[in-house]
Image (spheres, grey):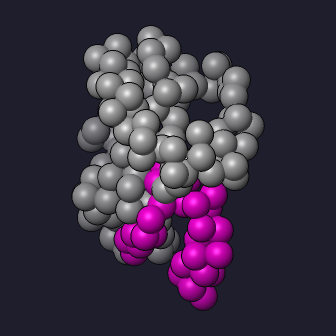
């Protein structure tokens, strides 16, 4: 799907996104909603997406394992982090939208929130130069 075609396919993509939300975690229409993870669905984004499959099912299972997201423990660990932290989020990230990431940033004692314009969940793919510049500026 080329970028100009993406807009034409928007109704089908929205339907796929709704189906994925209804049947989350069951395989659903993950492939159909993949374009929503990027600021643009061009050849670079498609290549990045294809390289991420089939993935590591064992790691995915452990990522969300019981106890992995214990709220009290997670909040305490983030509050104890004394290092400066950069939270860089894409403007169009549906997985980690900027308002949610701003809430996470508030949990750290020393956090910087950067929202990369026109980027999705993979800002280094959408605009590598801007991603590097933001990261480099933070690292000083």
Residue in the image at 43% along x and 36% along y: 9
Q: Residue 125: say if magenta.
A: yes
Residue in the image at 28% along x and 53% along y: 100
Residue in the image at 28% along x and 38% along y: 71
- In the image, residue 125 sits, relative to residue 34, either above or below, namely below
Q: Position of residue 127 (x, y in %)?
A: 59, 67
- In the image, residue 25 sits, relative to residue 49, either above or below, namely above
Q: What quarter of the picture does the C terminus occupy?
A: bottom right
Left or right relative to 88: residue 97: left
Q: Nearer the viewer, residue 91 or 106?
A: 91
Q: Nearer the viewer, residue 96 or 106?
A: 96
Q: Quadrant of residue 66?
A: top left
Left or right relative to 120: residue 100: left
Q: Nearer the viewer, residue 130 or 110?
A: 130
Q: Position of residue 37 (x, y in %)?
A: 49, 44
Q: Residue 83: say if magenta.
A: no
**Range drawn in magenta:** 111-140
Regarding residue 48, the answer to whether it shows in the image is: no
Q: Quadrant of residue 46?
A: top right
């Amino acid at each position: 799907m080329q970028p100009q075609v993406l807009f034409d396919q928007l109704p089908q993509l929205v339907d796929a996104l709704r189906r994925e939300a209804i049947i989350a975690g069951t395989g659903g229409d993950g492939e159909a909603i993949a374009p929503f993870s990027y600021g643009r669905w061009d050849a670079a984004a498609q290549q990045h997406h294809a390289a991420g499959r089939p993935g590591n099912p064992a790691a995915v299972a452990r990522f969300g394992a019981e106890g992995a997201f214990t709220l009290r423990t997670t909040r305490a660990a983030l509050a104890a982090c004394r290092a400066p932290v950069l939270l860089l989020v894409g403007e169009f990230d549906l997985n980690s939208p900027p308002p949610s990431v701003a809430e996470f940033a508030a949990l750290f004692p020393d956090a910087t929130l950067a929202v990369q314009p026109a980027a999705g969940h993979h800002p280094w793919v959408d605009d590598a130069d801007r991603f590097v510049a933001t990261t480099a500026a933070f690292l000083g």
